[in-house]
Image: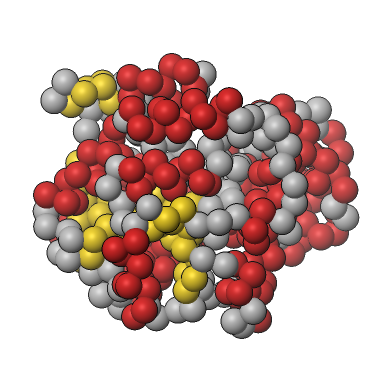
Amino acid sequence: MEFAGIIAEYDPFHNGHAAQLAAVRRAGARCVAVCLSSGAVQRGGVPILPESVRVRAALNAGADLVVALPAPYACATAEQFAAAGVALLAALGCDTLAFGAETPDAARLMEAAALLQGVAIQPEIRRRLATGQTYAAARAAAAEQLCPGAGALLRTPNNILGIEYCKAIQTQGAALTPFPLPRLGADHGGAPGEHDGIPMASASHLRGLPWLKWAPFVPQAAMDLYREAAAQGLMLDPRRWETALLALLRAAPPESFATVRGVSEGLEHRLAAAVREAAGLEDLYGHLKTKRYPHARLRRLALDAALGIPAELPPPPYLHVLGARREALPRLKQVALPAGTSLADLARTSPAAGEIAALHSRAVDLSALCREKIHPMGLAFTAKAVVL
């Protein structure tokens, strides 16, 4: 390990994230890059914390480079999210991909990834889908039948994402070695705990608390950033988020929903009806809910429809640098994609880059509208990189 990469949201950055960065350093990494969800998050929303705060928190805790996972990929399925992150870190020149896992066994995760890409599992998944199972349940059951023990790996959230990282490494032939690390002190979405006397809580748990109650679970430097962001009105306002997303959905032509990513089996008609009837976001998701579709997919569907994310996207076409330590900047001279701190410049490098930059900017504009203090449009193109 010489140049390690991590794919993350850091919304918020907490003690577990700091411990992960420290573990990667102890394992020998001389440089650590973070591919950070930008403009949107995978749960189907926009970040609670603004991008600059999350970038600074990462750099303060030991990251050397922070590059964007643009919004169209950041709010995608686990498979698309992982594929984009792996592609960007491989293009950056990383040799290792570090991630949290309930089962930190790289060989088992890689074996499960290969199983999911084999031809034998697909008929088994289809057979179970026909009985009404969700895709996740059908896949786990099929994997267990073909390889006892694999099903259990596919029933825990960090393992699931880790296996998607391994699939992407295999599919892309990426020169990345998976480096799974155990979660410390607190499970994803579970109750808080501690590790070596340090309080631990997952980001999903912290997002359910008022930000002032994050203090025991986040590094002091990060908490100082959060206080400053709150004082400046930069925190997400949930009511503004709800109103803005519903307004975009109501303004969109219903026929446009048919071309949105994630639409299948007539789901565009269900979405159009839900948009007409919903009195709030939870009401919208309730109208969309069926046994077939998990809540997270429906949240992503609503955001994709509001932003006009198409069904097909090109691979990530550029490396947008959000932050760096000065001594790490020379690494950008040997990357495999156009790279820089100006999204406007990157958008001009290819038609695909222009498409992704425009979609990303829509998400950033939506996020700017949903802060406690509303911010202007165009921030995706005018925000400055954080350089320490």
Name the one closer to the observer, 17 or 108.
17
> Where is 215 relative to 31, above or below?
above
- Quadrant assignment, res 296: top right
Colour basis = secondary structure
- Rendered view: 212 above or below 163: above
- The reply, left or right, for residue 310 in relation to residue 327 is right
* Residue drawn at the location 78% of the way across and 33% of the way down: 243
Q: Quadrant of residue 113?
A: bottom left
Q: Is 375 situated left or right of 101 in this image?
A: right
Give the image location of residue 224, x and y in percent: 42, 28
> Quick check: can you spot residue 382?
yes
Query: In the picture, residue 158 is in which quadrant?
Result: top left
Give x and y (percent) for residue 99: 28, 51
User: Which x, y percent locates residue 322?
Assistant: 48, 57
Left or right, 271 with respect to 386, comes to right
**Which residue appears at 55% of the width and 56% of the height?**
384
Near-viewer residue (134 or 310): 310
Q: Residue at 61% of width from left, 34% of height from top?
A: 234
300 versus 264 height, above or below = above
